[in-house]
């Protein structure tokens, strides 16, 4: 295995060639905020929270989709980056309808935690109060689009791991929304295997078990780990 | 009449093909049927002329009436170019009723008179003296109507009295006017001369000659070296050196490669690529074929936006003709396919465009890897803009050094601009790189006419690069047009849209207009562009409604910088540019739009403080 050495926030790190900058940062024992990234799924670089400054590059780069390169000097926690992250989280809160007080995911919500992480106590941007739907047609789970941050984790977990591709994003810009099947009620989508991986992958309370009430959605203790393990397995030999 | 600097008869060293079918007969009427003139009724006009010829004297039989691409001065359309003794000459048909398309208002008698005059006139002056009013239907002839001689180009002659029916005007355009004389057609060399639906005419002028030469005489390395030496840079906006891009694709590990032509021209006010597609599609196909040869690709795509139906129709026909002639397609080593977009502006961004070709949702993805390394279906893919590819045959034909001698040190060749907005003469101009904005906007375009009843008038700013570019104020009009100079002013070359803004336009209003465009066209994949542009537009709304405090300008600027720094693709990163450049050059207008600092100012929105250090806060969640 070829090892690369790079410097992240002043710290020298050695990582296997082919690692992402996000993996390298974690190997260095540093934390980078992420919302759209989930280990085991194809990174998309959409939430822009893991942006880092790479010496010699004028543009900030998302750590999740950037490959670590030999000799890179990376800053992950400058005052500029902190401010950009805080603004980004405020924009997330302002564009949806996020009410922690009666949210099923309160206490286990990654967006909520992110607000604390970046030091956001309120949004300086006016709330948009978009009109969004709730889909409770599935027998086990529900989708509350008000809480969706369009991270597309559910889309990817369903397409890449379950192979069902029930979810997708429709519309564009602020009209983007999560749709099941061919924009059908979730319960009518035959392709759905009711595996629940999308619910596990959802960082907020947008996808949840019907049984759960306020603050009762908790991450499955081992599923996220299993997800990673499945992804990293060598391809199954042909029978 | 002097021969013309601007639309010279193409005088390139024509290949052996040229001798076989001379393209220009003695007398012809070239009718512009590109989109601009179509809006002026060019379709019915050419139909009426052909019908008139069918029933006119045998004297009219010698006249060739053909449909051609853009004749440049779009504001005066429909335009007719006449070739004959003392020609060529350019004429504009106009109507006395601004609501009526002149081309649609022409009567059969008038058409017949026009055809006869064109077929028999001993010179352009005789044709210019043609009085269409005399042939008005209802035969209500105005007494002693003045003979309309050549009028200043771009300025409509006074409408004749029109008792009943719609009056038509018939004006000769002065081809020695700077609007034409300063043009240097290179990409548009054949546009306006050949019938875009006829491959024979294109072949007669030597099109596809360089493609043949590539395959028989040249190596891919030699072609790439030539493009390299020419200094050609991408005309889509970013200005990346074309030769370098070709090399990157060609030098990837062995395997399949693709070439793609980006014809998804979506910037408001940009219609250069459309004019190439509508006026000379074979040149583009040749350029794309040469590019494919140079990088070793055997298949390619042309991605055209659906909003260009005429361009799609003509390109499709051109492709079919090239297949029938055996120039492209099976046996030639190159398969080209046309793909039509579905109305998304973002698909002009290269990675989104490739996604769309693959049948996926048109959304950009982070680069690297660049398409040159991993593009269509993971294969190295060369993607170039229409104008870039259309310049390639000329480089091969005339030589890299010839091309590199045009333009400035860093920006070589010519650039086509679509001049629009408040300017007197709108249309298509192709000028050498480094021409000053003043030359283009004032000398060629005629500046901004003064509004009736208001003193002055004049150019306030020029918006270049559409929603990704910025405005350049009037006092900087002497800036030469090249990639670096425009960037230094906070604008961008962009694809070549040049919207002229008059004194009547409020700059915050213009900034909001472009921001609204970005809000509507954001694909929604990344947060800053999806949610940030919405907030930016609302901040501008507040400003224009007189509700904003002066402090909110800082907020506006800060959010602009955030969206610029953190968006995923070039479109998001460039979306705040119109606002930022307007703030830079016209800050006073923004301040004036704010409401006065009120006693409540202390309670107004707080400016953004710096966020606390990253990491768990005391008492916060881990």
Image (cartoon, rainbow, N blue to C red):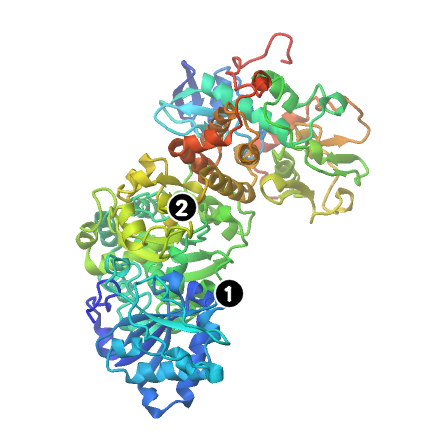
Distance in Å between CA atoms under marks 2 and 1: 24 Å
Left or right side of B445 for B507? right
Left or right side of B249 for B266? right
**Chain letter of disc 2 in the image:** B
Residue appearing at x 34%, y 26% in the figure: A56
**Chain letter of disc 1 in the image:** B
Q: Secondary structure at mark 1?
A: loop
Instruction: Specify few, some or many for label 2: CA neighbours under 10 Å numbering under 14, 14-19, or 20 or more.
Output: many
Judge whether residue B610 can be spotted in this image.
yes
Is B135 drawn above or below residue A81 in the view shown?
A: below
Q: Position of residue B500 (x, y in %)?
A: 38, 48
Judge whether residue B218 can be spotted in this image.
no
Of all residues, the one furthest to the top in this rendering is B618
Residue B501 image label: 2
Residue B99 image label: 1
Is A39 drawn above or below residue A180 in the view shown?
A: above
Residue appearing at x 61%, y 37% in the figure: A156
Q: Secondary structure at mark 2?
A: strand
Q: In front: B107, or B268?
A: B107
- Quarter of the figure that contains the N terminus of chain B: bottom left
Left or right side of A106 for B83? left
Is B581 drawn above or below residue A117 in the view shown?
A: below
Q: In front: B446, or B13?
A: B446
């Amino acid at each position: 295995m070829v090892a690369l050495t790079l410097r992240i926030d002043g710290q020298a790190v050695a990582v296997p060639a082919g690692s992402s900058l996000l993996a390298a940062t974690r190997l260095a024992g540093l934390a980078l905020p992420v919302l759209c990234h989930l280990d085991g799924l194809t990174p998309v670089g959409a939430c822009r929270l893991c942006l880092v400054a790479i010496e010699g590059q004028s543009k900030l780069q998302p750590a999740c989709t950037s490959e670590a390169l030999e000799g890179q000097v990376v800053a992950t926690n400058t005052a500029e980056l902190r401010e950009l992250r805080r603004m980004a989280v405020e924009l997330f809160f302002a564009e949806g309808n996020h009410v922690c007080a009666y949210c099923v995911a309160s206490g286990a919500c990654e967006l909520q935690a992110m607000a604390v992480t970046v030091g956001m106590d309120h949004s300086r941007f006016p709330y948009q109060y978009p009109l969004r739907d709730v889909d409770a047609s599935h027998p086990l789970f529900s989708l509350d689009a008000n809480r969706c941050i369009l991270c597309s984790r559910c889309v990817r977990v369903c397409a890449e791991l379950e192979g069902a591709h029930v979810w997708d994003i429709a519309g564009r810009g602020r009209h983007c929304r999560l749709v099941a099947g061919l924009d059908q009620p979730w319960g009518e989508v035959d392709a759905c295997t009711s595996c629940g991986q999308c619910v596990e992958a959802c960082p907020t309370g947008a996808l949840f078990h019907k049984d759960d009430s306020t603050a009762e959605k908790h991450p499955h203790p081992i599923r996220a780990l299993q997800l990673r393990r499945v992804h990293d397995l060598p391809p199954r030999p042909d029978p | 009449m002097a021969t013309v600097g601007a639309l010279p008869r193409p005088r390139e060293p024509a290949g052996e093909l040229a001798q076989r079918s001379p393209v220009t007969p003695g007398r012809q009427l070239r009718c512009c049927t590109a989109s601009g003139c179509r809006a002026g009724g060019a379709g019915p006009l050419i139909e009426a002329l052909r019908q008139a010829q069918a029933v006119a004297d045998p004297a009219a039989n010698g006249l060739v009436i053909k449909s051609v691409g853009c004749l440049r001065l779009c504001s005066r359309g429909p335009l007719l170019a006449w070739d004959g003794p003392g020609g060529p000459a350019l004429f504009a048909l106009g109507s006395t009723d601004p609501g009526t398309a002149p081309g649609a208002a022409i009567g059969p008698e008038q058409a017949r008179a026009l055809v006869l005059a064109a077929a028999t006139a001993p010179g352009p002056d005789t044709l210019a003296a043609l009085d269409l009013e005399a042939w008005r239907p209802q035969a209500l002839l105005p007494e002693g109507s003045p003979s309309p001689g050549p009028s200043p180009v771009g300025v409509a002659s006074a409408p004749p009295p029109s008792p009943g029916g719609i009056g038509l005007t018939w004006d000769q355009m002065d081809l020695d006017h700077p609007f034409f004389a300063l043009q240097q057609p290179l990409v548009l060399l054949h546009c306006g001369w050949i019938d875009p639906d006829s491959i024979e005419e294109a072949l007669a002028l030597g099109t596809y000659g360089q493609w043949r030469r590539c395959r028989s005489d040249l190596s891919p390395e030699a072609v790439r070296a030539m493009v390299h030496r020419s200094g050609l840079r991408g005309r889509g906006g970013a200005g990346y050196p074309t030769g370098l891009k070709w090399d990157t694709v060609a030098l990837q590990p062995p395997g399949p490669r693709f070439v793609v032509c980006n014809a998804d021209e979506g910037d408001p006010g940009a219609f250069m690529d459309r004019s190439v597609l509508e006026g000379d599609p074979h040149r583009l196909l040749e350029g794309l074929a040469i590019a494919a040869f140079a990088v070793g690709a055997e298949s390619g795509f042309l991605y055209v936006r659906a909003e260009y139906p005429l361009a799609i129709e003509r390109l499709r026909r051109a492709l079919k003709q090239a297949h029938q002639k055996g120039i492209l397609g099976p046996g030639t080593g190159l398969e080209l396919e046309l793909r039509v977009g579905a109305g998304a502006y973002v698909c002009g961004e290269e990675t989104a465009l490739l996604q769309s070709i693959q049948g996926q949702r048109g959304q950009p993805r982070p680069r690297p890897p660049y398409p040159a390394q991993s593009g269509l279906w993971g294969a190295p893919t060369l993607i170039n803009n229409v104008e870039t590819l259309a310049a390639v045959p000329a480089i091969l034909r005339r030589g890299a050094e010839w091309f590199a001698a045009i333009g400035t040190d860093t920006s070589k060749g010519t650039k086509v601009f679509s001049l629009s907005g408040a300017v007197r003469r709108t249309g298509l101009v192709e000028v050498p790189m480094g021409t000053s904005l003043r030359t283009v906007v004032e000398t060629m375009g005629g500046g901004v006419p003064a509004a009736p009843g208001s003193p002055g008038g004049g150019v306030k700013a020029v918006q270049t690069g559409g929603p990704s570019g910025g405005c350049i104020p009037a006092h900087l009009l002497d800036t030469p047009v090249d990639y670096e100079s425009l960037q230094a002013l906070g604008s961008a070359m962009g694809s070549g849209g040049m919207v002229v803004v008059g004194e009547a336009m409020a700059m915050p209003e213009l900034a909001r207009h472009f921001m609204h465009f970005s809000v509507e066209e954001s694909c929604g994949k990344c947060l800053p562009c999806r949610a940030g542009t919405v907030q930016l537009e609302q901040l501008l709304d507040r400003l224009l409604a007189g509700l904003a405090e002066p402090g909110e300008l800082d907020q506006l600027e800060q959010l602009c910088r955030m969206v610029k720094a953190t968006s995923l693709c070039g479109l998001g990163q460039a979306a705040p540019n119109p606002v930022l450049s307007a703030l830079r050059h016209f800050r006073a207008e923004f301040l004036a739009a704010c409401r006065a600092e009120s006693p409540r100012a202390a309670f107004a929105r707080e400016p953004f403080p710096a966020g606390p250090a990253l990491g768990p806060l005391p008492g916060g969640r881990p």
